[in-house]
Amino acid sequence: MASVLRRFRRLAPPGGAMAGVSPPEDVDAERHMELASVFATLDAVQRDVDGILDAAHREADRITATAVAGAAALLARARDDAVLEKARVSQERMSSFAGERAAVLTRAHAQAAAIRNSASARADAAAAAVVERLRALAADGEARRGR
């Protein structure tokens, strides 16, 4: 109701020929005219913002694609390095085991030689003891015969 009453506002103080009567006022049209330039500016700004956002999205997509490709290359290189490192470690272990095996075999040969030498010495000592005992028994037997 207030907008209807505002249309017929007074243009002059009361009492004149046109007292109380004035041409209708279109408030909405005035607002639209006042805001039209603001909205036109906002539309231009929105177009600029949309262009900037599109460029930013394209740049982000390009950066993402570059990062994905770099990560894939880095991962492939890491896998290759891992395979090479595993092979190197396996070779080191094999060399270490071969060295340990050679050391164990050397110790085993030395122990076997010591055992053979000890057994030979014991066999010689046992043979000498048996011969000595046999001589003693023979001498004792001859001594009993001669008595």
Image (cartoon, rainbow, N blue to C red):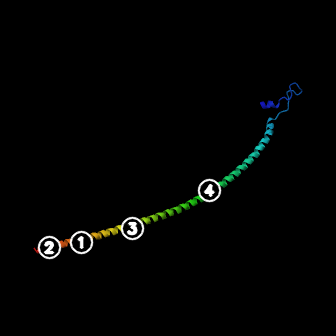
Mark 2 vs 1, N-terminal side: 1
**On the picture, is 66 further left or further right than 42?**
left
Q: CA distance from mark 1 to mark 4?
A: 88 Å
Mark 3 and 2 residues: CB-CB less than 8 Å, in contact? no
Query: Vertically, is 7 above or below 80?
Result: above
Mark 2 vs mark 4: give the one in front.
2
Mark closer to the observer (4, 3): 3
Precedes in sequence: disc 1 or disc 3: 3
In 3D space, how far apart are the residues under numbered discs 2 and 4 (Cα atoms)?
105 Å
Task: Give the percent coordinates (x, y) of residue 8.
Answer: 83, 30
Q: Residues within 10 Å of mark 2 (few under 14, many from 20)?
A: few
Q: Residue 128: percent from the left, percent from the top?
A: 24, 72
Residue under numbered circle 1: 128
Which residue was labeled with disc 4? 68
Q: Quadrant of the N terminus?
A: top right
Residue 49: image x %, image y %? 72, 47
- Toward which corner of the image does residue 127 lie, by quadrant? bottom left
Task: For marks 1 and 3, give the CA distance.
Answer: 32 Å
What residue occupies the far right of the structure in this picture?
A: 17
* Image-based side of 76 in relation to 110, left or right: right
**Quarter residue 105 falls in:** bottom left
Label 3 sits on residue: 106
At mark 4, the secondary structure is helix
Nearer the observer, disc 1 or disc 3?
1
Say what secondary structure mark 2 lies in: helix
Q: Give me the C-alpha separation between circle 2 and circle 1.
A: 19 Å
